[in-house]
Amino acid sequence: MSFSRVSCTLLKNAIGIQNNVRSLSYTNHQAMRFVQYRDGSERGLGIQLNDSKSIVSLSGVDSTIPVDMVSFLHSEYSVERIEKIVQEKKKVLQSNQVELLPCITKPDKVICVGLNYKGHCDEQKKPYPVEPFFFSKFPSTIIGPHDAVRHSSKSKALDWEVEMAVVIGSTCKNVDINDAYKYVFGYTIAQDISARDWQKTRNNGQWLIAKSMDTFCPLGSVLVHKNEIPDPHLLQIKCSINGVMKQSGSTEELIHRVDKLVSFLSNLITLLPGDIILTGTPSGVGVFREPKEFLKVGDIIESEISCIGKMENPVIADK
């Protein structure tokens, strides 16, 4: 069963809007859930309506709005203008009649955080990191919410890692932790597919190849604006393989939280609009199971985070 949207509304009503974001009314509120889509030969940017079945086209109505999310985040967009287009509903598309793309394509950076869930550290019998532990994936690894993960013949140990991803909304450099949320645009769901044999025993201990083979970053179709999620540390997160639950946790387990990660990184690296931060995975990955379990051709990976959404990726043989 999918996580309920109702629970997200209750969460917003109970907590209220915080973290220095603009207040919205939640009575009959249309959630700001951004999607990238392809309609025939045309790409576009839109807002997924609350019924999840329809999309209000933004770029198809206003030619000043870019057709891709990264360009949109670099532009001088107006939230009020976006809300007006959604209210007018001049161009509405049916979700099942377009191709939903990953909500971010071609970001400047995909930055990942290792050992950032207490349960994931516990299953390895490792201490909780005092400082965040970062690594990266190539942006070319990104695929869509229903695209296939290609099982490389060069690996015999492909593993799953469901993660909440943070998307940066504006250029971010030397930011204080108290201001960090001002630079977050929103959240989506991701998978950090990992070739454990390459991670553990190949490439002289460096993780880049293990994490960056083709198709190793499935990304959700929906980018949920931060206003919709008043506390990103109160979300349920889970992953199933072939319908069998493998990971089930809460973002409450995060050791280094979103504001700490954004602030810490920005004092070392300039974060740009559209940059993605994968915040870590809960316990239950295959490599630490007894006996070990790894993905095989024909498997179906289901990933879900409450208030954000769900994606389903098959595993196929690499050509």
Image (tube, rainbow, N blue to C red):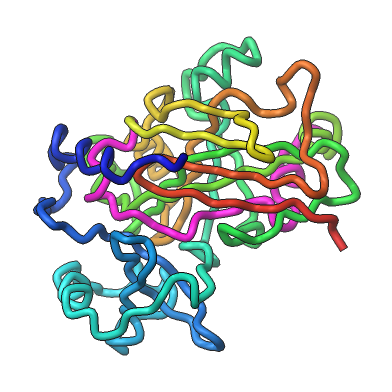
* Residue at screen point 75% across, 42% down: 210
Q: Quadrant of residue 11?
A: top left
> Number of labelled discs?
0
Residue farthest along the front direction in this orientation: 1
Q: Nearer the viewer, residue 14 or 104?
A: 14
**Residue 70 visible at all:** no
Residue 220: % across, % down: 50, 55
The part of the chain drawn in magenta is 204-233
The magenta stretch spans residue 220: yes
Q: Quadrant of the C terminus?
A: bottom right
**Considering only vertical position in the picture, is 11 above or below 124?**
below
User: In percent of the image, x 57 and y 21: which residue is there?
Assistant: 120
Q: Is residue 154 in sight in this rendering? A: yes
Pick the residue in front: 170 or 48.
48
User: As displayed, is residue 91 above or below residue 142?
Assistant: below
The answer to whether 124 appears left or right of 99 in the picture is right
Q: Is residue 283 left or right of residue 31?
A: right
Question: On screen, 93 above or below 162?
Answer: below
Which residue is depicted at the point 13% across and 51% down?
Answer: 26
Is 127 situated left or right of 34 in this image? right
Above or below residue 274? Residue 296 is above
Q: Picture coordinates of residue 29 (x, y %)? A: 16, 57
Q: Position of residue 24 (x, y in %)?
A: 12, 54
Where is residue 271 drawn, in percent x and y?
42, 53
Quarter of the view holding residue 76: bottom left
For image coordinates 65% across by 61% down, the residue present is: 147
Q: Quadrant of residue 232?
A: top left
Q: Is residue 10 magenta?
A: no
Left or right, 113 with reference to 6: right
